[in-house]
DNA sequence: AAAACGGGGCG
DNA sequence: CGCCCAGTTTT
């Protein structure tokens, strides 16, 4: 039998769902996959332009598979959660080379792709192949929690299991793709996280949360976020038109992106000659005394310090400073580093907080 | 079961 | 400033 919820949702979809999106109605599983990866933990408005850049630059899975990782990361730059991009490339190569470009066409094989979890597998399965798998994303948690008045938390394994069960029971098996799309559209435009449009809602008479005046309390989450403060001093080493950059390693934020030589601290101390000497000596692997000699030989100069840049991430609060150090002759080796000119620099992917600096103070540093 | 992983918008 | 967003992976 069909649940009242399902009937109301499909009715709303036919009568009142006006939400155009570039991937809506798309049947190419590759493009659907692309859109779903881009949209993980990302608002539709934010992902929109990235989707269009990606389908234009890489129209087929082979185009993406053959692209250089750095190019793809540059296209992803600013979107965050960069592992999504690396998994995207990995899976594109797998599909292109191992599967001869034939996209997986069932739930289990979709789930086997790196970067594809239960949500994304259900989304592709239902949108591309109309297979009966219910998507469970933030919208679905919220809409179901409110409609059925469910007080189980949406961020514990038990709660998630419960919501998966309810989502599956309510799915329209015959119109899985349309139902899933409708449910997310409904959650995003009517049953919104804050200030939901209950006054005009077609589900009003059946919505447990509305009838009990609990709309604003649902869904329930039990975990709260804590933000850790971090302080970055980026040392911008400059020599004869080239800048020293390093590729960040995995295991922290921004893995695979580039940065200037980083010294992370417990706070932002005043930039003194002593501090600079200490960092520089350590970076060069020599003692402070040797450093003095070294600086004389290479004519190292401390030129200037940028203002402090701030950025708030979900779990971190960042402050960053950029310290310009010019050499007249090439300094001795820097491990794991690359000297690049300004043009090459622009082609590398950087974290947002570095890009802000590159678009402001860095320009002036290059002129002087 | 919890932590890690970006960046942006909203109240 | 805290919460949320078409979640997944690792610890």
Image (cartoon, coloured by chain):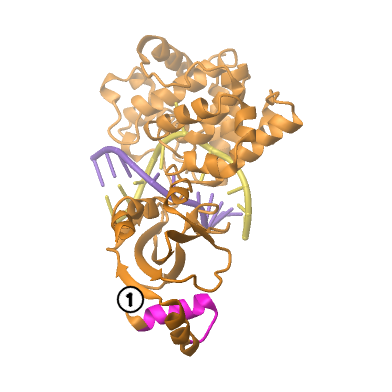
Chain colours: A orange, B purple, C yellow
Q: x, y percentage for residue A201?
A: 32, 20
At horizontal 50% and vertical 15% (from top left) the residue drawn is A25
Would you identify the image quadrant in which residue A111 lies? top right
The main secondary structure of the magenta stretch is helix
What residue do we see at 37% from left, 16% from top?
A17
Q: Residues within 10 Å of mark 1 (few under 14, many from 20)?
A: few
* A314 relative to A110 in the view: left or right: left
Residue A167 image position (x, y, % from top left) = 54, 28
Question: Which stretch appears magenta?
Answer: A274-287
Q: Is residue A276 magenta?
A: yes
**Dot 1: chain letter:** A
Task: Say if residue A84 shows up in the picture.
Answer: no
Q: Is residue A196 above or below residue A68?
A: above
Closer to us: A47 or A205: A47
As drawn, is C1 to the left or to the right of A86? left
Q: Secondary structure at mark 1?
A: loop
Query: Total number of numbered labels?
Result: 1
- Report which residue position mark 1 lands on: A269
């Amino acid at each position: 039998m069909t649940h009242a919820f399902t009937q109301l949702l499909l009715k709303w979809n036919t009568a009142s769902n006006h939400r155009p999106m570039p991937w809506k109605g798309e049947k190419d599983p590759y493009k659907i996959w692309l859109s779903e990866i881009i949209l993980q933990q990302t608002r539709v408005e934010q992902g929109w332009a990235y989707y269009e850049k990606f389908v234009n630059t890489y129209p087929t899975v082979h185009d993406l598979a053959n692209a250089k990782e750095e190019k793809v990361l540059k296209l992803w730059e600013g979107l965050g959660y960069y592992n999504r991009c690396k998994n995207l490339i990995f899976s594109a190569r797998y599909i292109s080379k191992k599967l001869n470009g034939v996209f997986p066409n069932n739930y289990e094989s979709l789930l086997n792709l790196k970067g594809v979890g239960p949500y994304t597998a259900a989304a592709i399965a239902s949108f591309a192949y109309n297979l009966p798998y219910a998507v469970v994303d933030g919208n679905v948690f919220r809409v179901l929690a409110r409609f059925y008045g469910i007080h189980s938390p949406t961020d514990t394994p038990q709660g998630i299991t419960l919501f998966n069960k309810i989502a599956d029971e309510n799915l329209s098996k015959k119109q899985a793709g349309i139902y899933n799309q409708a449910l997310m559209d409904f959650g995003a435009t009517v049953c919104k996280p804050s200030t939901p449009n209950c006054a005009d809602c077609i589900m009003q008479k059946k919505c447990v949360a509305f009838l009990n005046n609990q709309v604003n309390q649902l869904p329930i989450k039990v975990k709260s976020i804590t933000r850790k403060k971090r302080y970055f001093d980026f040392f911008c080493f400059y020599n004869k038109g080239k800048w020293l950059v390093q590729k960040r390693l995995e295991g922290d934020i921004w893995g695979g992106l580039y940065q200037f030589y980083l010294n992370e601290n417990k706070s932002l101390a005043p930039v003194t000659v002593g501090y600079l000497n200490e960092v520089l000596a350590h970076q060069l692997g020599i003692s402070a005394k040797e450093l003095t000699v070294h600086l004389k030989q290479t004519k190292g100069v401390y030129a200037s310090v940028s203002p402090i840049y701030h950025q708030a991430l979900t779990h971190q609060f960042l402050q960053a400073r950029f310290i310009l150090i010019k050499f007249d002759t090439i300094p001795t080796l820097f491990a794991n580093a690359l000297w690049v000119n300004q043009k090459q620099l622009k082609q590398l992917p950087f974290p947002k907080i570095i890009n802000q600096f590159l678009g402001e103070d860095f320009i002036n540093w290059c002129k002087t």
